Amino acid sequence: MNKKKAIVIGAGVNGLVLSNYLQKSNYDVKIIEKSKSIGGACSSDSISINNKDISFAKGATVLGMMPDFIFKDTGLSKKLKIYSPEFQKVVYFENEGSEVNIYKDPYKLQKELYNKVGERGSVIEFRDDENKVVQFIKDGYKTGEPPSIDSAIKVLGKDLVDMWITGTARDLLNHYFTSDKTKLYMGMTVIESSPESIDSKGSAFIIPLMDSGSVFDGYWGYVKNGIWQVTEELGNINKSIGVEINISSEIDEIDSENKKVFLESGKSFDYDVLVFATDPLTPTKYFKNKKLKKTLEEKKYTGTSGKVTAFFKNKVKWINHSDDDDSLSSFKFIFSVDNLNDFEIKSQNAYNKLNYYEPGYIQVYCEGAGQRKLGNKEPFDKLIFFTKNISYDKKGYEIPEIHEKIKDTVFKYILNPEDCVKSVFLTPKDMNQEFHFPEGNIDHMMLTDGQNFNQRTFSEINNSFYNFGDLLDVFYCGAGSYPCGSVAGTAGYMCFKNITRHK
């Protein structure tokens, strides 16, 4: 049986996952990657401190949204050691001395929120309904079915769909909770990748979406040595099954009529199927579809997430916490606001570039403690401060005062801040330069009204969600497609199902 020829453009996690499934389904797969290494935003950097080298995550930091079946099907489960902290997450409100423990058990969490922030709503009802929506999302991943409002209503009923999928985050949070502090924690993922308004239609859906990975059953965690091992190992697995990976390869031209890709090096490849696992704007350089180009130009792409990677010469010690690495590796959250209105104002101020930085919340990934739990001994402890509300204006080195302000905010909760010997600050502008994210958005495209859930597609072909425009043999599965970005590979898998379902 003759193999079909597939060319995949982009060697990030989606391109690698798609290639893995296609190659094992009687396709001859070639990957074209313009960077000198694979991985996309799931890649590493290194720094030398006191003559000691240490690697760190350049873009993505933690693993969470990957489905368990992709982790197993691709062979990654046999290659990687992963860990998610069992210890509860901890929330700090910057203007107050107390901390709030976010327990996995909804009954314990209900009691904690009642005692600490006066919550009189129902955490249990919220978690029950969220789990129903998350299960619906997961089932769609597994079958590779494109997202549909009609199918959601059949499974969940119209009330849940109106609230959790097409509704606003503010209405969702107000339905279940009475305390602004509870609403802030439960709703913070709405602006995880972009400055989405909590009053935007469909913004509620971002909340269950961010909990829909099953590799850690809805939670997030660490990969031994670093998250970039996901793409490095997947690249090795793909090579071992026959995928050809071409790095440092720039495309010169695509002849869609004769199904040929020409590289600047002079090489050319024929294809039966061509897939872009890139940002959504890149494919428009090669096709003369004015309607599609105009549609893409009108989309919203802005990102407002930045990150500081801080290195400590000794183990980081948190105020009021034990020295146990499961406790030390749990996720920490620091809120500089205490109500939804301020949360919204600061997010939108960053979006509208009224200030370079509007303190909202900082999510702390305790990477060093996570690596110790995984048996990886490194010369420095590491913390990553995932920071919200940085406008798309300047690179990190241009705003050192903001770099220091972010560190100072976190250091209030650390007993040994003087042990921090180095830190690296990346802004949305840096993310754009490093990874070609349009306007610095880690999910490439905002998760906003008109480009979320069933509308997160560029296909003009009926019943073929991942086609690109009206091109029958050209597809798109980058982070700008459903479900969204993160180190998940779900869009790559769902695109594979789309391609093979209609072949």
Image (tube, grey):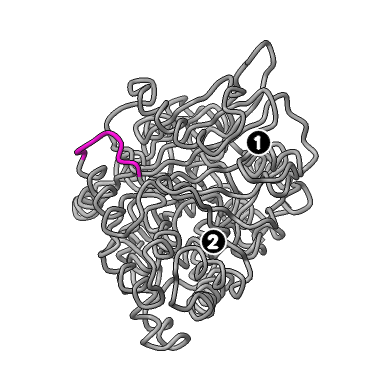
Q: Which numbered mark, 2 or 1, is in the foreground of this view?
A: 1
Find numbered disc 1 in the image and state the secondary structure of the residue it sits on.
loop
Position of residue 290 measured from the top left corner of the image (x, y, whole percent): 19, 50
Position of residue 123 measured from the top left corner of the image (x, y, whole percent): 50, 75
Q: Amino acid at mark 2?
A: Phe
Residue 265 is labelled as: none
**Residue at the extreme top of the image, as rendered:** 51
2 or 1: tag closer to the N-terminus: 1
Along the line of sight, the residue nearer the viewer: 23 or 482: 482
Residue 317 is labelled as: 1
Residue 496 is labelled as: 2
Find numbered disc 2 in the image and state the secondary structure of the residue it sits on.
helix
The magenta segment is 353-359
Q: Residues within 10 Å of mark 2 (few under 14, many from 20)?
A: many
The image quarter containing residue 158 is bottom left
Q: Residues within 10 Å of mark 1 (few under 14, many from 20)?
A: some
Residue 232 drawn in magenta: no
Q: Amino acid at mark 1?
A: Lys
